[in-house]
Image (cartoon, rainbow, N blue to C red):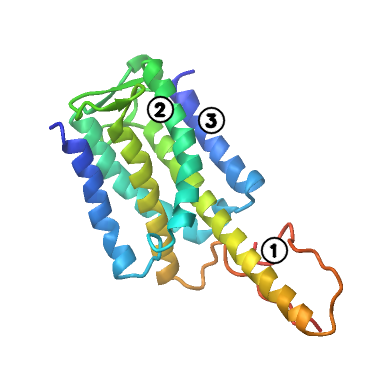
Amino acid sequence: MTYTAAAVLGVVAAVVLDVAVLRTRLVRRKAFWTAYAIVLAFQLLVNGILTGRRLVTYDHDTILGARLAYAPVEDILFGFSLALQTLAWWVWWGRRANQARANLARTSAGAATRNRVARPTRTRRSSTL
Amino acid sequence: MRWLYLGVLAACLVVTLPLEVVLGARVYRRPLRLALTLLPVLAVFLIWDAAAISAGQWSYHHLVGLRIGNVPVEEIAFFVVVPICTVLTLEAVRRRRPTWRIGDEPPTLPTDQ
């Protein structure tokens, strides 16, 4: 598989993780795209140094050949995949912790009142999604 | 030159540190959540990196020379540092734009009535 194909696959895998697996749906959020735009600017700078000084070199047969700030365009896709996967996991773990906390609060509140009816401890989609 | 790659990564950590200290991103102060985020990302990208190196898709030069398998330590550091900076950026955006939802906000408790 060429780097071009792997990079496209990397983006697809990250979007699937975000939308379908973890259901964090960051690709639909302004906050994500704002953060990504900032990350991208710094990525171009850092990548520019690493590839411009030839610390990292690429096999010509595995890339399209188009470059942005010295780095092959495939690196943009690679960086997007890294950013989206990272943030999807970060948000997923945070959501889990907050839901667990809320369920705990709800259970103890319920136990303190008349309501002892069993209720689902987890909702598949919380109202915050 | 040997230390340039690690130096650039150190600079990334220094430049983003104010997001934690001044803006209150609270990323380093949630080490468990950060570690659980880094682990799956590290696993996926180190496998990708190792595969690309052995396929000859990219190669590294002028590094400190330490490798784990065929992956230079700089690359392992990269997949720790860059995700940390990315999370710091998202949390900084959240601090500056508190009305923008990210998806991990605590669920509002039902009134129970």
Q: Which residue is mark 1?
A: A126
Q: Which residue is mark 3?
A: A9
Q: Position of residue A14 (x, y in %)?
A: 54, 40
Q: Earlier in the sequence, mark 1 or mark 3?
A: 3
Q: Which residue is mark 2?
A: B49
Residue ID at (74%, 73%): A107
Q: Chain of mark 1?
A: A
Q: Measure how far apart labels 2 and 3 are at the Cα level.
A: 14 Å
Residue B63 lies left or right of residue A28; in this view the side is left
Classify 10 Å Cα crowding around label 1: few (below 14), some (14-19), many (20 and above): some
Q: Are marks 2 and 3 in contact (CB under 8 Å)?
A: no
Q: Residue furthest right?
A: A117
Q: Chain of mark 2?
A: B
Q: Position of residue B9 (x, y in %)?
A: 25, 44
Residue ID at (50%, 54%): A90
Nearer the observer, B50 or A117: A117
| Residue type, numbered disc 2 | Asp
Tell me if residue A63 can be seen: no
| Residue type, numbered disc 1 | Ser
Tell me if residue A37 can be seen: yes
| Residue type, numbered disc 3 | Leu
Residue ID at (69%, 63%): A126
User: Does residue A42 sit above or below B90 in this rendering?
Assistant: above
Could you tell me which secondary element the residue under label 1 belongs to?
loop
Q: Position of residue B87 (x, y in %)?
A: 42, 55
User: Does residue A121 sit above or below A61 in this rendering?
Assistant: below
Residue A110 lies left or right of residue B34; in this view the side is right
Residues flagged by tags 2 and 1 on a common chain: no
Q: Measure how far apart labels 1 and 3 are at the Cα level.
A: 30 Å
